[in-house]
Image: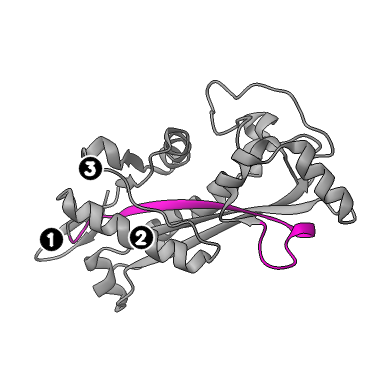
Amino acid sequence: RQLIKGDRFQMSLTDLTFFTSNQTKLAHARYLGRPRGFRILGFRERTYYAGYNEPRTADREELLEASFTSALDQASRAKILRDDTVFFLEDTSVKIDALSSEGEYPGTDVKYWMRSTSFEELDSLLKSNGNNRACHVRSDVVMRLPKALQERLETAKKYVVFTGVQTGSVAIAEQVYETHLFYPWLDNQTFNKWFVPSGESQVLGSLPIKIADKHDFRANAMDKMFAYLETTPYG
């Protein structure tokens, strides 16, 4: 699919490079991209270079900016960075309303927080704070704007951010189930095992794929990226 044509170059946006070391996220992105006509390539599949450095900070803008800058540097070092190269990275965060009086909690720190927090600890915290179990999961996808697209849009911005949010609540009891064999992002390891999407009675990780798709925070953000690439007026 040729989206930009000119006297000096033409750019195909069929292939997109995903900066992630998380194979589950990569499988998820491929699942989301395939029906839209996008082939998602893992950065480590294209080069032996390591992924980007992700700072541990509660400041989302700082996190995304630093992560993008690191990814840009790694792509340049790996010699896969051209004027027409499109790559993206993704960050997932969580806000539990009752525990977020001084900022989003656990926020961008969620993957580290999950390693040291049990359901019993979280449940106790919620009950001691009025038992408001409302929360949401947020996905931020950062996509590089290639030079050709910067010129067409007359912008100096190096990247654009697409955000997806799914509201819901923390489960009232911990569910026991296995990670899905074919859709491994429906797992029993991440916050998906405690997160009940609005309108559902089961946690996201245990839902059938067709229902889970309706509440997919990452799909929400990535579909915005795909639509942007499909519909942005290039010339």
**x and y percent of residue 157 in the render?**
33, 73
Q: Quadrant of the C terminus?
A: bottom left
Q: Nearer the viewer, residue 152 or 79?
A: 79
Query: Disc 1 residue type?
Result: Phe
> Is residue 154 rendered magenta in the image?
no
Q: Residue at the spot x=36%, y=66% of the render?
A: 159
**Circle nearer the N terminus (3, 2):** 3
Residue on which disc 3 sits: 49
Task: Read off the magenta span.
Answer: 83-105
Q: Is 86 positioned to the left or the right of 163 in the image? A: left
The residue furthest left is: 8
Q: Quadrant of residue 188?
A: top right
Q: Nearer the viewer, residue 206 or 150?
A: 206
Q: Residue at the spot x=68%, y=37% of the render?
A: 204
Q: Residue at the spot x=61%, y=44% of the render?
A: 216
Closer to us: mark 2 or mark 1? 2
Determine whether the residue tagged by mark 2 lies in a helix, strand or loop.
helix
**Circle nearer the N terminus (2, 1):** 1
Name above or below for residue 78 compared with residue 207.
below
Do the numbered discs 1 and 3 sit on residues whose CB atoms are within 8 Å? no
Query: Disc 2 residue type?
Result: Phe
Closer to us: mark 1 or mark 3? 3
Query: Disc 3 residue type?
Result: Tyr
Which numbered dot is residue 9?
A: 1
Q: Residues within 10 Å of mark 2 (few under 14, many from 20)?
A: many
**x and y percent of residue 168 in the render?**
75, 49
Q: Residues within 10 Å of mark 3 (few under 14, many from 20)?
A: few
Residue on which disc 2 sits: 68
